[in-house]
Image (cartoon, grey):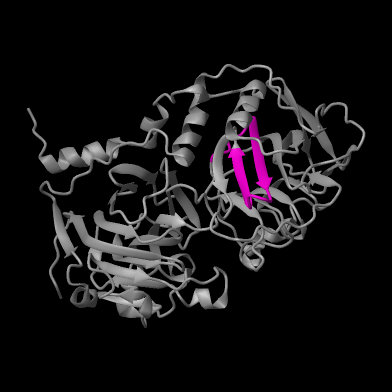
Amino acid sequence: MNHMNPSEINRRRFLATSLTAASAVSLAGWRLNAAPGENSIKPKFVHLANAAALAKGECVKGPARVLELKGRKGINPTSIHTAIKLTGGHTLNEPRGTLALWFFGLEDLAASFVSDNMKMQNEFFDNYCFLSDYEVPRNYPAANFSFIWNRFNEFRAKFFKGTVYPTHEGFEPPQKAWVQAVPFNYFQQHRWYQLAVTWDDAAKSASLFVNGVLLGKSDIFNKDFHRDQTGEALYAGCPALCHGEIEFYDRVLTGAELYKKYRAGAPDYDRAVETELRHHFEGADLQNFTFNPLPAGWTKQFDVDFKNPVEQIKEFYIQGHTASVKPAGHPEGLLIETPLLRYGSPEAFNSQVYIWSSKTFEGNVYVEYEWKALKPNGLSLLMIQASGMTREDFMADYPKKTNGTMDTVHNQNVRNYHWEFYREMNDVRNDTGTAFSRKNPFAYRIGYGSAPKSFAINEWHKLQIVQIGGKIQGAIDGKILLEFGDNSRTNTGCILNYGHIAIRCMVHSALVFRNLKVYTEKLPFTEAKI
C-alpha cells in the first residue's frame, strides 16, 4: 500500500477544491424556493412587449429578425448599423426609478484580448449595448445614459455623457452617477437574463442587478450623484444580442421584487446560474480555506512580524508616496496611510504607494499576513509573482520605479497576479467586502468574490493566498473569497511562477500590517550558483 506524505495529501486536497463545490451547494430560503406567480408590481412604461408586432413609438432601422427562445421573443439586429428606436416614455429623468430588461446572447459574453486594429470600421466593437439614449448605441461616450457590457468584463450603467475610463470624466466634480460590476464574465449564450439598474437621487445611490441578484452599488463614500438629462428617445442594437422586453418604473425596486419578477418571467430558470451569481456577488456558500504550508515540502522564505517596523521596513523597497509609509505610526504594526484626495485628480495619482519585498520567490507560493483598516474607504492590494516580461528581476535589471500609480500593477512591463483584498472604492460593489484579481499586464480579469458583509473596521483580519501551478485560492478570515485557474494557453502568457511580492495602498487608505510570511514549495530541480 502506498502512503502519501502530509505535504502531498495537503497539495491534492487543495487541487481538488474548486468553485464547482460552491455551485453544488443548495441555496436556502425564499430565493430558490419562491414559487413563480402573478406579480403585482406594474411598470409605468413598457417597450418591446411584443417583438413580432411593434407598438406605437417602436421601430427598427436596418436589418433585423425576431427570435423566439423557450417561449420568449426578442429582436436581433443582423447589422452593426441596425438600431431599435424606442419613444413613448421612460423614467430615467425622474428622481428615482428602475429599468429592467430581458436579453439573451447569441454567443457567450466573454472577455478577450483587445487591440487598436480591431477598431477598423467599428471603433466601439468591444461594447455590447443593451440600451442607450444615443442613436448609435455602441458609442457609449456620446450617450447621456448607457447600459452596456464590454470585453474588459465591465458591466456598467452610466448616467452622464463621457467615459469612466480612461479619461476619468466620471470622477470629475461633481462626481457623476454610474454603477458597475467588474469583472462580470457570467453571461452564457442562449439563456434569458433579466438586467436591472435602479437609481435614487435623494439617496445618491444606484444599484445593478442580474436576475434579482445585487451585483454593484454606486460610490457610497461620495457626496455627489450627478445625472445628465437622458434624451427622449432610447436605442438598442447589437448583432450579438437578442433584445427583449424593457420596463421602466417610477420607484426603486428591491432585489426581492426584481427576483420575483424574474422567476415569474424566466422561461429557462437554472438553479446553478443563480447559485454562481449569489456565490460571487453575495458571498453565499463560502468554503473554508484548508491549505496548510507546514507539512514537509514547503519552506518559509520570509517572515516579518512588523513588531519593529522602523528596522524591518529596510527589507522592502518603497515605491511612490514614501511619506505614506509610517513605520513609527502605530503600536501594533506597520501603518500605511495615504492622503485623502479625490480619486482621478492629478494629486491623487502621485499619492499612492507600494512596499516591495527585496527578496524574490520562485515556484508555488503561499503568502499570509494580518491587516487592519483604521477607517472606511480606500484600497489595498497584494501582488505576487511580479517579474519582468521574460521572468527577469525587474527591480535588479532596470532602474527602480518611483511612481506609485496603478500603472505598475497592470500597465507596465511587470507580469504579476494582483488581488485587491480591501476595496471600499467607487468602481465595484463597495457596500460589502470583495476580492478582485487580474493577471497583468494582459488585462485578464480572472477572479472575483464577495463576503456577506463589509470587513469590520479597527479589527484584525487574516489574508491567505496560495498558488499551486495555475490554481490560486485567496481567503480572508479563513473563508475563500477568490478562486480561479490560469493556464499558459489562453493568449495571456505562461502561468507566472517567479518574482517579488508587493503590498499597495491607494488614496483614502489607512491600514496596519503585521505577521507577513511567505512560503514556497520545493522545486523539481537543484541549482548551483555560477
Q: Position of residue 310 (x, y in %)?
A: 21, 77
Residue at image location 30% in from the left, 49% down from the top: 469
Q: Which quadrant of the structure image shows residue 169?
A: bottom right
Q: Relative to residue 128, is residue 143 depicted above or below?
A: below
Q: Relative to residue 393, is residue 469 depicted above or below?
A: above
Q: Relative to residue 500, is residue 488 depicted above or below?
A: above
Q: Can residue 19 be seen?
A: yes
Q: Position of residue 360 (x, y in %)?
A: 25, 68
Q: Residue 188 colored magenta?
A: yes
Residue extent of the magenta highlight: 186-209
Q: Nearer the viewer, residue 76 or 332?
A: 332
Q: Residue 109 colored magenta?
A: no
Quadrant that contains the N terminus: top left
Q: Position of residue 130 (x, y in %)?
A: 71, 43
Q: Is residue 299 left or right of residue 103?
A: left
Q: Can residue 108 be seen?
A: no
Residue at image location 81% in from the left, 53% down from the top: 134
Q: Residue furthest right?
A: 56
Q: Nearer the viewer, residue 479 or 337?
A: 337
Q: Is residue 151 left or right of residue 517?
A: right
Q: Residue furthest front?
A: 202
Q: Is residue 227 left or right of residue 422?
A: right
Q: Which quadrant of the structure image shows residue 106?
A: top right
Residue at image location 21% in from the left, 72% down from the top: 309
Q: Residue furthest bottom?
A: 399
Q: Is residue 329 left or right of residue 231?
A: left
Q: Nearer the viewer, residue 391 or 160?
A: 160
Q: Position of residue 466 (x, y in %)?
A: 28, 50
Counting every numbered tag in the picture gives 0
Quadrant that contains the C terminus: bottom left
Q: Nearer the viewer, residue 367 or 247?
A: 247
